[in-house]
Image (cartoon, rainbow, N blue to C red):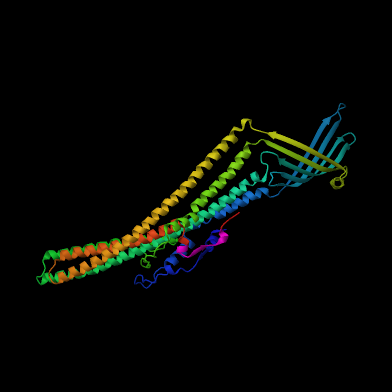
Amino acid sequence: MNARNFIAGLILASVPSLAFSQGGDSSSEPPLSLRSAIEKALEQNLGLRIQTLAPDIAEEAVIAQEASFDPSVFSRANLSQSDLDWEDSNGATRQTTSDSRSYSLGVTKRIKTGAQVTASASQSRSDGSSFNSELGQLVGGSLSERASLSLEFTQPLLRDFGSEVNLAPVRRAKSQARVADLRTRNAVLNLLQQIENAYWQLSDAHQRRNLRQSNLELSERLLEEARERERLGLATRIETLQAEANLAQRKEQIIRAEQAIREATDALYAAMGVLDETMALDPQLSVYPLPESRGEPPSFQTTLDTAIERNFDADIQEEVLEQLEQDRILARNSERPQVDLSLSSSYNGLSPESGKDAFSEAFDRRGDDWGLRLSFNLPWGARAAKSNLRQTLYRIDQEELRLAEIKQDLLRSVRSAWRDLDASRQQLAAAKIVVQLQEATYEQETSKYEEGLSTIRTLLETQRDLDQAKLSLLDAQLATVQAEITLARVEGSLLDRHGIEWNDTLTSEE
């Protein structure tokens, strides 16, 4: 499974609750939808692309472990020649030569029981002669061609015996592959949470800027009125200065709001994986307004049950324990003595003519031999193996406690996220009431001001109270959306929230 296939395995379906119909900014470009941002992030987010390579690496590690049982072909060739000149007792020069050659070809395979099977064919040639200088010719010497067809079987009887031990590295590698898959899924969920939070934070920044812009326009009108009232003698210079100071504050707030939009835009672009050096320093991106609440969530018990069922962190920890179980098997294996039984047998052929004749003799089974070997090895006291086993058992105890801690943390996180959402909903309801009250108060104070029954200072204070109420409402709206996102992440229902389904073929189950 490669990164492209993993992303292709994420099926995005249509989710009506995410198809918001509210209008965005009044720019010519249509607002970026949350769905488009998610699709772009799943395709281009650098962190996710890095993580999606982990399953590929883990799968290759599985192949590498399984390859230890693949057959292996071997061959050897040896050539040896020597020449020796010497004088005999009569002072005659003599020469002795020797020529020996050997070739072998075979295949060996390790099987799951720990046994090693080797089949081979070999040929050896030896020739020797001496040269008499007085006669000027070779004397003596002989040619011998030998061929052998062999089969050897070696089976460990204690250490390294059985498929449980020999397949432990393969099972461990497969568990690591499942961990890589689970961590990639966790990365997808974390990215969904990051993207949605970044999207709504940008939306919140736009709405705050729009609120500041509306306040700026109102402050400009108030200043114009204050100047006109001062000209007519209905207001003092102090009131005009108060209106001018109020306008300056609004402009300063607009500057901060614009900066917040730029920072939130960069955060969203970075999460989507599209932020690069070609992008303008003042990017323009419109999004949809903050949505209304999605309605009542399921009961706490239903949420908790779903969270327990979909908790990838607990699944990863279970795989860690599975890997340690394989380590325990290998550690116990290391405590055993090394007792190996080897059986060998071969058919041999001998010929003074050629290697072909020697192999014919071997195939005709003119000669044979067999052998039996038993070897024993045990480190004195086996202290290292026993220490390794104890360490593995301690680590198993440690990771079992960590699994319990993960489940406890999940329970705490669900309870906390549930409370946060409940509190955010209540705060949102209260914020809406406060806005209604402040709007009515501001309208009343405006009427008084226009009738000359109130001062501009009182009116500005009432306006600031209304602004603060609207900002608090935006805070409550964003907090509610973020609480819903957090609860969905903790619960493991972010996929459902965004209409994403895992392709079942992504899971590596054995």
Q: Quadrant of residue 17?
A: bottom left
Q: Quadrant of residue 258?
A: bottom left
Q: In the image shown, does 388 or 110 lie closer to the viewer?
A: 388
38 lies left or right of 137: left
136 lies left or right of 199: right
Q: Quadrant of residue 468?
A: bottom left
Q: Position of residue 229 (x, y in %)?
A: 13, 71
**Count of marks, rendered view:** 0
Q: In the image shown, does 375 or 405 lie closer to the viewer?
A: 405
Q: Position of residue 136 (x, y in %)?
A: 88, 37
Q: Residue furthest right?
A: 135
Q: Position of residue 224 (x, y in %)?
A: 17, 70
Please check the rendered image and state whether residue 272 is part of the magenta-colored stretch, yes or no. no
Please check the rendered image and state whether residue 505 is part of the magenta-colored stretch, yes or no. yes
Q: Position of residue 392 (x, y in %)?
A: 55, 40
Q: Would residue 46 be seen by someone viewing this image from the given angle?
A: no
Q: In the image shown, does 189 or 143 lie closer to the viewer?
A: 189
159 lies left or right of 199: right
Q: Would residue 232 be seen by someone viewing this image from the given angle?
A: yes
- Quarter of the picture containing the C terminus is bottom right
Which residue is at a point 57% across and 50% down the rendered structure image?
Answer: 175
- Quarter of the picture containing the N terminus is bottom right
Magenta-highlighted residues: 496-506
Residue 346 higher or lower than 229, as above or below: above
Which residue is at a point 50% across and 51% down the rendered structure image?
Answer: 314
Q: Residue furthest left?
A: 233
